Amino acid sequence: MNKTLEYICSAIFGVSVFLFWWLLHPGALAFQEQNQLFLFTMDYLAERVAVAGGFADYIAEFVTQFNYVPVLGEALMAMLFVVFQRSIARSTGKDEWYVLSFVAPVMMLIYMSDFYVLLSYMVSLIIAVQLCALYRNHPNVIFASAATVLGFWLIGPAVFVFTAYAAFKEKNKYSTILISLAVAVVVVSKLTYMQQYPWKTVLCGVNYYRRAVTVPAMQVCIAIASVLPAVLSGFLPKPKAYVNALLGFAVVLGGVLSVYKTHQKDLVELIAYENLVRNEDWNGILKRAEKYQPNSELGSVSVNLALFMSGRGNDFPKFKQFGTKGLIMPRVRDFISNSASSEVFWRLGMINESLRYAFDTQESLVNNRKSGRWMSRIAECQILNGRYDAAEKYLDILSHSLFYRKWAEDQRQYLRNEEAIADNEVYAYLKSVRYKEDFLFYYPEMEKMLAKLYMENTNNIMAVRYYNAWNTLDKYEADDKNTYTGNAHGN
């Protein structure tokens, strides 16, 4: 395959990756960003590199923060996939089988549609494959040994892709040495600075998958597919033109069919709603819901919030409902179920509940990260509660980030400054419509709390809208009229 055609194929692949995230998974990359908070501090760097694979994780989180601007995140992701593909092609040293370099990236694209997959896995594989290319041009067993030891610490067990390639290329006693060294590195790491992690996690990566104790089979398959072209390049004969064409067609067809088979429409819509609620794009939510009705309580919370915020409360019966839980979810300790309800509480003026839901969402992040989005909301709630020291602590943290820094610095004007708060339209309104006194929150009596909220301030139109909707849905739930409430699937 000539160089021009190679570049064209890589460019087409990059555009396809961009469209994959933009059209098929809107909001997915922004959702990844809101589940981390990259900080430009030495402590943050030290925390990441303290475990195997931490350096790759640091790079991945640096890139992921740019998903705050969705189009920018999608463009960067497309570039990374092209780098991954080109790295595999470079590791083979031959252009004849260039088409094989697309197999692992296509598999990775499908794999990353699972939002539990972290970008650090692909970053680690890119580095490992680049090591294979370097070793192919400059074979040296000392280099391979050092790269295995240092690489495990920097990029995690993905380095064993390179170790396996180097051992295969040696085909002598040095192969045994490299394999033994890899085993020793894992054992020593487990017995020293990674004692708290189970063996499975140490062997398969701490930061590759959001659930560290889970190792999907796809992760192993992609690792094999990443190094296989380099291994086979020395054995495969030069293919006929039609062979490359057939292989290219097979890769494209397999990718398209896999995308179709693995596409989870309900989950995609939930993530899209999540991003639209965050950006207060109420019309965008309703346009999506009109084309594809939400199929869960969580989706219904977002749609109903959009209805009331856009002044389309009369259209409430036109959308599929899931009872009162589709208005406000009871507290669920995971990193997505509370999010829309926290936004509802915030706009109702139920500041403490918005704070509680936001805090629980952040603390429920599976890989123990923090969240820029939820830390911002916590800071806002603490400002309104007059707990300025607590708010200042969160603003200090956010000030070390890229996209939240300006917002955090702007919020400092409201610390211990009631006049500034009164001049802020949102803060002044929320302080005027919130409860006049604290009391014990009790979800089963939500209608009473909504009524109390309205009675204390009749300007709180959201409260009366939610009160009426709650009673309507509660009535249908009691009468078991499924034609109206639908069949809730839960989350």
Image: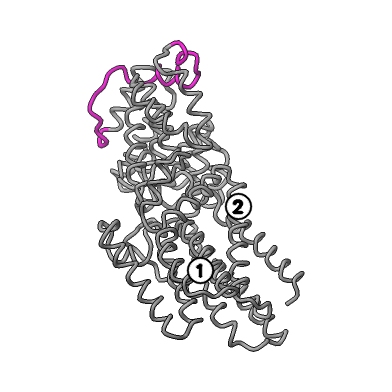
Q: Is residue 95 above or below residue 239?
A: above
Of mark 2 and mark 1, the one earlier in the sequence is 2
Query: 336 or 470, which is in the foreground?
Result: 336
Point 69% across, 80% down: residue: 245
Whether residue 312 appears in this view of the structure is yes
Q: Position of residue 3 (x, y in %)?
A: 74, 71
Which type of secondary structure does the marked residue at label 2 adopt? helix
Q: Please give the label number shown on residue 261.
A: 1
Q: Which image quadrant for residue 132?
A: bottom right
Q: Which image quadrant for residue 397?
A: top left
Which type of secondary structure does the marked residue at label 1 adopt? helix
Q: Position of residue 481 (x, y in %)?
A: 34, 48
241 relative to 215 in the view: left or right: right
In the rendered image, which residue does mark 2 sit on? 76
Tell me the mark number nearer the camera, choosing from 2 and 1: 2
Give, as a single range, the part of the protein colored magenta.
419-445
Q: Amino acid at mark 2?
A: Leu
Is the stretch drawn in magenta largely helix, strand or loop? Answer: helix
Q: Amino acid at mark 1?
A: Lys
Q: Is residue 206 magenta?
A: no
**Residue extending furthest top?**
419
Q: Position of residue 270 (x, y in %)?
A: 46, 50
* Distance in Å between CA atoms under marks 2 and 1: 26 Å
Q: Residues within 10 Å of mark 1 (few under 14, many from 20)?
A: few
Point 49% across, 39% down: residue: 277
